[in-house]
Amino acid sequence: MLGRKIYGEVRLVLRDDPAVIKESYADYADAGFDFTKLKFVEGQSPTVFTVRPMTYRQKMAFEEKANIVQKIEFAVRCGLVAVSNFTIEKADGTRMEPPPIKHIDQPPYGLMVAQEWLEGAGIQTAYLVEIGTAIISITEVPLKVGEQ
């Protein structure tokens, strides 16, 4: 049987988060980012990126992007909903969290992360790649053989 699994919002924890017990990450990822599969170092909290799949129109526009950098950025802008427990350390040593994500309506794609928020948030490129890749993976998930 052919089919597709449709995800809602997912709590994404990145592979290198020091709060995660590394041996639990594969089960989490294999289970479609099932947060209950993660185990954490006692007394530590992970950074959580709440993400959602791209809509049909967003997915069609994603496919038209010229290169992988544009595709990843577009996926992040489409799918990133919230960030918690992420710290930015400024040059003077002060620490802060980025401001709440600003979403703007981008017809015909719907709500997307504002470009200026993404540019100012201070999220490293490697993290953006992992976040974007996760959003892409939850956008088009085939139904596994035997699932009904």
Image: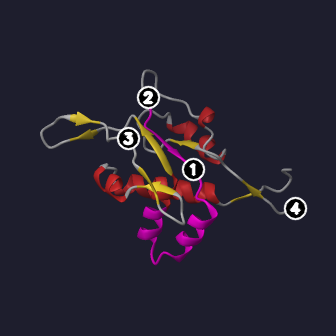
In front here: 76 or 22? 76
Query: What percent of the width, then of the height, locates residue 56?
Result: 63, 64
Q: Residue at x 46, y 78 (%)?
A: 66
Note whether 103 is above or below 90 in the view shown. below
Q: Tell me how far mark 2 sits from mark 3, CA to CA.
A: 19 Å
Q: Which residue is mark 2?
A: 45
* Residue type at numbered disc 3: Pro
Q: Tell me how far mark 4 sits from mark 3, CA to CA.
A: 42 Å
Q: Is residue 145 visible?
A: yes
Q: Tell me how far mark 3 sits from mark 1, CA to CA.
A: 17 Å
Q: Tell me how far mark 4 sits from mark 1, CA to CA.
A: 25 Å
Q: Is 130 contained in the magenta span? A: no
Q: Which residue is mark 4?
A: 1
Foreground mark, 4 or 3?
3
Q: Which residue is mark 3?
A: 100
* Residue type at numbered disc 4: Met
The mark that comes first in sequence, 4 or 1, is 4
Name the mark on residue 84: none
The mark that comes first in sequence, 3 or 1, is 1
Foreground mark, 2 or 3?
3
Q: Are marks 4 and 3 in contact (CB under 8 Å)?
A: no
Q: Tell me how far mark 1 sits from mark 2, CA to CA.
A: 21 Å
Q: Considering the numbered disc 2 on the image, is that residue within a helix, a strand or a loop?
A: loop
* Residue type at numbered disc 1: Arg
Q: Residue at x 77, y 56 (%)?
A: 143
Query: What percent of the width, then of the height, locates residue 25?
Result: 55, 41
Q: Are marks 4 and 2 in contact (CB under 8 Å)?
A: no
The mark that comes first in sequence, 2 or 3, is 2
The mark that comes first in sequence, 1 or 2, is 2
Q: Considering the numbered disc 1 on the image, is that residue within a helix, a strand or a loop?
A: loop
Q: Residue furthest left?
A: 92
Q: Considering the numbered disc 4 on the image, is that residue within a helix, a strand or a loop?
A: loop
